[in-house]
Amino acid sequence: MQKGYAAIIVLFVVAVATVVICTGIGPTGIIGPGISGSDTASLVLFDVRLPRVIAAMLVGAGLAAAGVVMQGLFRNSMADPYLLGTSSGGALGAALAIVCLGGAFHGLLAFIGCLAASFIVYGLAQNAGRVQVEHLLLTGIAVSMFFAAILSAVMYSSGQNLHQILFWLLGGFWNISWSDVTLGLVILPAAFCLLLFSRELNIFSMGEDDATHLGVNTERLKIVLLGISSLITGIAVAIAGCIGFVGLITPHVVRLVVGPDHRFLLPAAMLAGGILLALSDTVARTVGNEMPVGIVTAFLGAPFFIWLLKRRYAA
Amino acid sequence: MIELAGLDVNYGAQKVLDTITLEAKKGVFVGIIGPNGSGKTTLLKAISRVITPSGGIIRLDGLPVADLSSREFARSVAVVPQDTHAGFDFTVRDVVLMGRYPHLNRFSRETEADLAACDRAMALTGITHLSGRSINAISGGELQRTIIARALAQEPRHLLLDEATSHLDISHQVDILTTIKQLSTEIAVIGVFHDLNLAAYFCDEIIVLKNGKIEAAGTPAVVITPKTLHDVFDIDASVSVHPVTGKPLVVLLPQSQEIARTNHRVHVISGGGTGAEIIRVLHRAGCRVTTGVLAMNDTDYAAATELGIACITEPPFSPITERSTSALAAQIREADVVVLTAAPVGAGNLDNLRILAEADDTPVLFLSDDGRAEVPDYTNGKAGAFLDSMKGSGRLTVVSGHELVNRCTGGNYK
């Protein structure tokens, strides 16, 4: 428990430092409030970089939170926020907006696509008012494939728009404004709701029957947690597209450090996810020459994850 | 109190439980036994609301369980399932503390009382020393004790055990069941058992399930009989009263090899349990077995009556009467062979040997594993004298159990 509090405090300090440092770094050089007072500099700092860094923090935190919940509900450390078809649903929504509406409302349509996919999967996996997690998992895979097929068809016939769709699929923070940050802030109260259910999540990881025996209303828990994490994932996808790996790897790594208790795991993973994504985005927009941040997270994340797995299974 | 009235459970079109009606009161330990697939686990799952019954009603202290909230239910009923698959690396204490969940408010933290309940439960199940260990790093038996501790930490009024001690070694099984038995004065316990002797020893009442129906119910002494065990489990077992516990004691009998049915008449003179097994084996081998003279409180008498074998009897602690000795003489005359066991001989049953010695043409097989024809003799050598006379005349042959059966079924007595 002490370890949990300590980790959260350390991560919080690191997160604040990350915001300050990442805002200071950019293609136009290192600028800080004290270095330059010019209008351009303050514009770059406060209207371009700061919202972008904060948005990356929020999206990273949201994806990590959704990842923690998915891994807890599915009792599987390979689960990620996109398990219920949210990524392919969101991608399809955005692609349709790009092709049919010239890119207008693509965030809104992505959000709608995410939630629609979750609802469809949950609805299909329902049996006499009950949902088994295995059924949910497999239905999620099937619905994802179905949406991916439609998405491929849309991309195939999208002509010039293909490039734009591809960019969106990889995810990034190119045109972030303060309004995106406002939307992203919704993630915080939503994640707080998840935190209120962390004791139930702990118990649920012992198995659904055990959770029932201990007094957890498991059907309600699944609806609430899947609903909130789909909402969070939908917001994240609407802001930055389908950024992979953050939601899978952060909960996993943080669990190794703070342990499985969701009361600590959830906030710690959110801070770590935010830090990871803000740093990755900084790499993407400086060293990476504005490449999609999804490339950076996967490029750095995958080898790290392989190393982690090696170590774990060797022990 | 848990009451079930006309409970039906279907899995699809298949009826798994069929109009089950039972009652478990505070202070009563109810055991459920039955073969695999008889619906034992399903019954517990229905009571614990993991599956929804298709008919009938379950009441907890008079209230239909469907009316209770999840937490209310878990404050009243705790379950120890057959298997637990630990997901993440929680510590043993974390897992036991989960038992306090139904007592906690969403915004509250564990109070001193919660922690105390958790410590008590861990002490009762003997896992206090494992407190900080990960549940993925302890043995199966330790995990099971952790789960039992978690159930006790719930401080329930009803406890459901699904083969809760199946992963434990015999000493922990007895420890845990003794603890639960002590707790059962305050709470109602329903437990599924595989081990019939544990069930007989610990349960006040036993319910036998077969194909989703209650086949028998009542005290262990009433329910655990060779006939029920044969009907339900398709096993041959002997059931005796354990001399120390006074509870039924089940001993499985080896499945009989298919021996050609014989019509040989065998009279067995035994006593004090020395003949019970050979009586059963000979009976199953197809011999026409008679026994006696036996006292009516003798274990061999119980074995004989169980099998429906004719037995010349006397009331307990009574001398053998004139009527019995003549009956015995008649049985010995009609028998092809007499089997004699090393039963203790005293004044009360010395007549058995006397009559046998007097009937001088029926061969005698003496059952002994060490090759000697001796009995514990409390007659100042009179019993020994009868034995010696039979040995001297060549009537008596000493044989082992296996050989005895072969001889009796083969008609080779000398």
Image: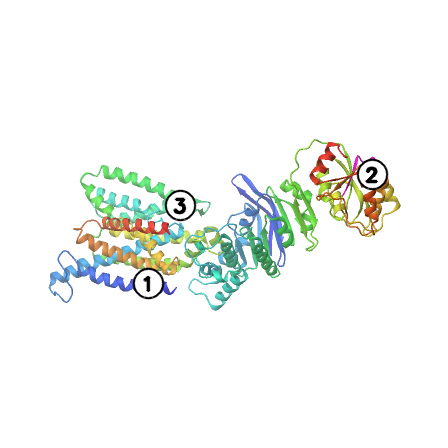
Tally of numbered tags: 3
Q: Are marks 3 and 1 in contact (CB under 8 Å)?
A: no
Residue found at x 16% / y 57%: A26
Answer whether residue B72 is visible to the viewer in this image: no
Indicate the secondary structure of the residue bearing disc 3.
Answer: helix
Q: Is residue B157 left or right of residue A59?
A: right
Residue A76 image offset from top left, x and y in percent = 39, 49
Q: Nearer the viewer, residue B178 or B379?
A: B379
Q: Mark 3 = which residue?
A: A136
Q: Quadrant of residue A36?
A: bottom left
Quadrant showing the N terminus of chain A = bottom left
Indicate the secondary structure of the residue bearing disc 1.
Answer: helix
Q: Nearer the viewer, mark 2 or mark 1?
A: 2
Q: Mark 1 = which residue?
A: A8
Indicate the secondary structure of the residue bearing disc 2.
Answer: loop
Q: Mark 2 = which residue?
A: B393
Q: Is residue B251 above or below residue A15?
A: above
Q: Amino acid at mark 2?
A: Ser
Q: Amino acid at mark 3?
A: Leu
Asked if the stretch drawn in magenta spans residue A48, the answer is no
Chain containing the residue with disc 2: B
Residue B120 image offset from top left, x and y in percent = 53, 64
Which residue range is magenta in the image?
Answer: B329-340
Residue found at x 29% / y 38%: A149
Q: Amino acid at mark 1?
A: Ile
Q: Nearer the viewer, mark 2 or mark 3?
A: 2
Residue found at x 51% / y 40%: B12
What is the CA distance from the residue labelled 3 to the residue labelled 1?
A: 32 Å
Q: Is residue B351 above or below residue B257?
A: below
Chain containing the residue with disc 1: A
